Image (cartoon, grey):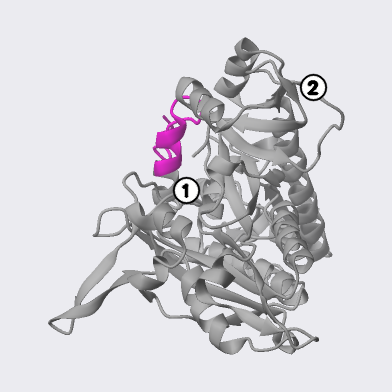
Amino acid sequence: MSEKDGLVSRSEDFNEWYNSLVLKTDLADYGPVRGTMIVKPYGWTLWENIQRALDNRFKATGVENAAFPMFIPTSFLEKEAQHVEGFAPELAVVTHGGGQELSEPLAVRPTSETMIGHAYANWIQSYRDLPLLLNLWNSVVRWELRTKLFLRTTEFYWQEGHTAHATAEEAAERTRMMLDVYDDMARTEAAIPAFTGEKSALERFAGAIHTYALEAMMGDGKALQSATSHNLGQNFARAFDIQYLDPNNERQYCWTTSWGLSTRFIGAIIMTHGDDQGLVLPPRLAPYQTVIVPIYRKDTERTDVMAAVEQIKQALAAAGVRVKVDDRPQLTPGYKFNDWELRGVPTRIEIGPRDVAKNSVALARRDIPGRDGKQFVPQAGLAQAVTDLLADIQAGMLAKATQFRDDNTQDVADYAGFKTAVSTGFARVWWAGDNVAELKVKEETKATIRCFPFDQPGGTGTCFYTGQPAQQVAIFGRSY
């Protein structure tokens, strides 16, 4: 355990490392109700940056934002049998309001498909009303038994997209399109490479005909389902009577989709990139991309140093760099270095009297600790140097995470090899098992089918578990 931050090393206890890191970096804290989470400003700014990256992408595909009520009549949930069965164990239900018992209990929103279905049935009349493409930024409540900050909490924040289409083909295209949007955001903004593919029938969203997902490998080799996109077919359209008049003036049921990414994605960033020194945040999403630490001992030194700091700050801000000046007088420079290293700020600028005299600064990068990650650069052109370094860090983080994922994804042909593979990472195998076989594998190894990846090798193989001919490859792994 490090004295400077009290962190257990990742290799010693990954779970404790994660929990203490979330708390010590001021990302979040525990709420007063069991399983709830308070997201602190540093964590919320990170979420805002994720929101912005997604929101721009959503709108580029024609999606508009809207807001829907958080209270849902329980009769709505009961209209789609698979849906209510899937969510019943997690529901929070309100039975009283205003001091009186309600005529009908209300579920606190676990997800909005049923509320959306009710509205779409009223709004959609003609093929001219389609497609209808909405997204909601909200929180939902699922009464979880085992909770973990960001990864699984009773209430969490997310976006949920809901679309309605005239044809099955349009719905299928939208479902895949939105998964591609998530994949692009994860790689480009968060430097997280994920396997993309279809979930098994057992892992499918309640009420969907197809569920697609991003399955990312965390630093301990486990999987984290980081985003999902669901083709709901006509299940919800039939349950809520969402129909339209086609060009031949005949009534048809719509085809609908839903898709979401939540604050659990912050957990993915932490567990993909963090190290024994703390967070390592991707520059494109980090709340601060650089922190300036002024160094001085005398008031006369302070005047010159802070004047240079202000000039550098303005130049960086003008170049679009998110910059923080740490001028806390009660703390030593060494403490500040460690503090911002713990918080994962991608770059750090140190400037003292000698640097002012030389018109230079010390520029350190978080992803390469120690002297190897530090260089002295001129103040002239510093904004461009920082911008270039941030791009290099971003690319390096993606390359490192991709290498780790690939090194810990093994192609195996037998059960013994499978068990070894899923103990440290993912197993890529030919699969021809049914639901019963899938459950047995889970019971015996704690590994599940994370997805049938879109990137299939083609041809046929032999199922590692049943020995039967197999038409597709699956990615198995233990998961959060």
Q: Nearer the viewer, residue 242 or 28?
A: 242
Q: Which residue is mark 1?
A: 335
Q: CA distance from mark 2 to mark 1?
A: 57 Å
Q: Quadrant of the N terminus?
A: top left
Q: Which residue is mark 2?
A: 461
Taking the spot 46% from the left edge, 59% from the top edge, the residue there is 83
Query: Can you give x and y, in whole percent of width and height, for residue 154 in the image?
Result: 35, 57
Toward which corner of the image does residue 314 lie, by quadrant? Answer: bottom right
In the structure shown, which secondary structural element does the residue marked by tag 2 occupy?
strand
Question: Which numbered disc, 2 or 1, marks the residue closer to the eye?
Answer: 2
In the structure shown, which secondary structural element does the residue marked by tag 1 occupy?
helix
Q: Nearer the viewer, residue 74 or 163?
A: 74
Query: Can you give x and y, in whole percent of width and height, for residue 75 in the image?
Result: 36, 72
Residue neighbourhood size for the residue with mark 2, other residues' Cα within 10 Å, grouped as few (<14), some (14–19), many (≥20): some
Taking the spot 39% from the left edge, 75% from the top edge, the residue there is 70
Asked whether 16 falls inside the magenta stretch, the response is yes
Toward which corner of the image does residue 350 lie, by quadrant? Answer: bottom right
Asked whether 425 falls inside the magenta stretch, the response is no
Residue type, label 2: Gly
Name the N-terminal-most of marks 2 and 1.
1
